[in-house]
Structures are given as structure tokens and as C-alpha cells.
Image (tube, rainbow, N blue to C red):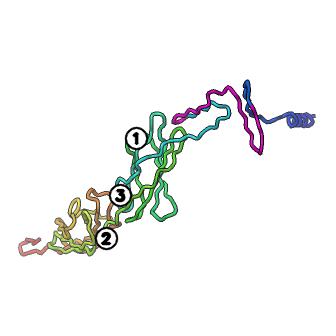
Amino acid sequence: MKKILLTTICLAFATFSFSQQLSRYVVSSGGNYSNAGGYSNSSTIGESMVTTLTSASNVLTQGFQQSFPPLTCDIPTNLQLQTAFDVQAWVQWDEMSSVSDSVDFYKVLYRAVGDTTWLIKQKTYDGNQTPIVKVRLQFLSAATQYEMKIRAGYNSGCISDFSAISYFNTLSECPNITNLSATSLKPNRVNFNWDTMGVYSFLRIKLRVDTLNASWMNAGGFGVFYPLTSKSKNGLTPGQSYRAQARTWCDPNGGSYRATGWTSPILWTQPNAIRLEGGTSIQ
């Protein structure tokens, strides 16, 4: 009995159910409809207000047959290089938020000139940079020209077109030194010497006792500025073995614009102090 009742209900739904339809109707005192050559034309009288009104995030249509135009929004302006190094760069542009519509995100596309694939850097914007917005592009190639363009996505849902192409160049690799050597001048003093392979800002030398997990110390404080090619270090232990390495920086403030790595370590042993009769030692 239950199966018969369920079957009856299903047949009734299938027979009398219908999908929803949305038809356009207008009540008018006059009008016309014509159809010829595969085209139709309909018109009515009484639609005196048919202008489309728009704002940054809204569109108001006032005519029955009026289409809905797409939203348009401002393209970011003044995309340009701020600072470039060898493998990274900072780029900047004008902040595009307005009272009527705020930016949700910026998307920068960039690539080396001649490449076919764009790299993407997207920045979610929360209003913390104005009137200039900037972003860092990383993992670039040294001494290379890049092209870039930008678009903005707004809180209204509007996404702008891309800007015109802008260009920038990365700098060459920071040249390291070569032929680092250590000469013991006294049992507690060593002199470092090296050769240059190009212009840089300063050189840092690190050294430590040649044992596992020994702490590093510097020779020359913050750094030895170009073009000097020697530096002495005092306070070493007579008879102790040491190792040292060097690295150049091309940014006078330090940071990441530097040689790709430290030089290979050099090893040496400080001479022992010479003891005279009576226990006096010569340093």
C-alpha cells in the first residue's frame, strides 16, 4: 500500500510540476513589435527616463530594454622602480583607493625582457601605505632588464585593466675578493691581505679558533672599506690554530646586496711566545 501511494505522488509531481520562468512585460499606452530577417525590434512609449547612472561601485538602469554595462575602475598609475640590487628590487606606484571604492589587492606581473612567462607578485592592500605603495620583487637575475605591469582589484568587485609596460634593470653581482692570506706578525697578532676583483663598498673578515663550534669574531669591526687590501687583528692566542673567511658588500648600509658567498677558509697557526731566562716572554 505504501509503495502504491509513493508511486502515485511521484507521478503527480512529474505531471503537474513546471519550472519557473521570468518573462519581461511592460504596460504601455502604445508601442510596436516587428520581426524580419532574423532580427526583432520592440518599442514602447512612456519610457522617458532611460539614462544609465553609474558610480564607482553601482549601476542604475532606468529603461526596460536597457543593458547592464560592466563596472570600470581606475588603473594604477606611475608604476616604477624604487631601488634595484642584483637579485631583488623594490617597485612602487600610486595608491588608488578613493572615498567611494577602496583597493582590495594589487597584482604586479613581471618578467625578464624576452621571456614568455610572467611572474606574479600580488599584494593584499589594507590601507597601510599611502600615497605610494611598494612591493619587493625577489629571485631576479643580476644585470638583467625586466618589464612589468600592474592591475588593481577593488572592494566593489571591479578589476582594472593592466597598466602600460614599465621597465627596470638589476645591478651586476657584487664582486668578491680573492687570494685572502694570513701572516702572523707576532704571537698574538695576524695581518690579512687580499686582492680585489672589482669595486665594492666594504669587506668583512670573520675568524675563529679552528675547533668545532668555536665562536666567530670580526677583524675590522663593521668592515674594511674599499680600496684597502690589508687589515691586522690583535688579541690572538700564541700557538693557537685559526681559520678565516671574507665577503664583500656593495651596499654601504649592509643588507642583502653582497657577494654570493664567503671565500674559502684559510688556516694558520700563531707562533708560540719566545721565553727568555727568568720567565720573561717576547710577544
Q: Measured from the top left, where is residue 97 in percent x and y?
A: 44, 39
Which residue corresponds to the image point at 35% horizontal and 63% vertical from the top-left?
Answer: 171
Name, please, the residue furthest toward the top. Answer: 29
Which residue corresponds to the image point at 58% horizontal and 33% vertical from the top-left?
Answer: 52
Query: Was residue 227 drawn as part of the magenta stretch in this picture?
Result: no
Residue under numbered circle 2: 263
Badge 1 element: loop
In this rendering, the answer to whether 165 lies above or below 47 is below
Boundaries of the magenta span:
32-57
Residue under numbered circle 1: 128
Badge 2 element: loop
In this rendering, the answer to whether 133 lies above or below 87 is above
The three-letter code of the residue at mark 3 reads Ala
In this rendering, the answer to whether 31 lies above or below 108 is above
Which labelled disc corresponds to residue 10?
Answer: none
Name, please, the residue furthest toward the left. Answer: 278
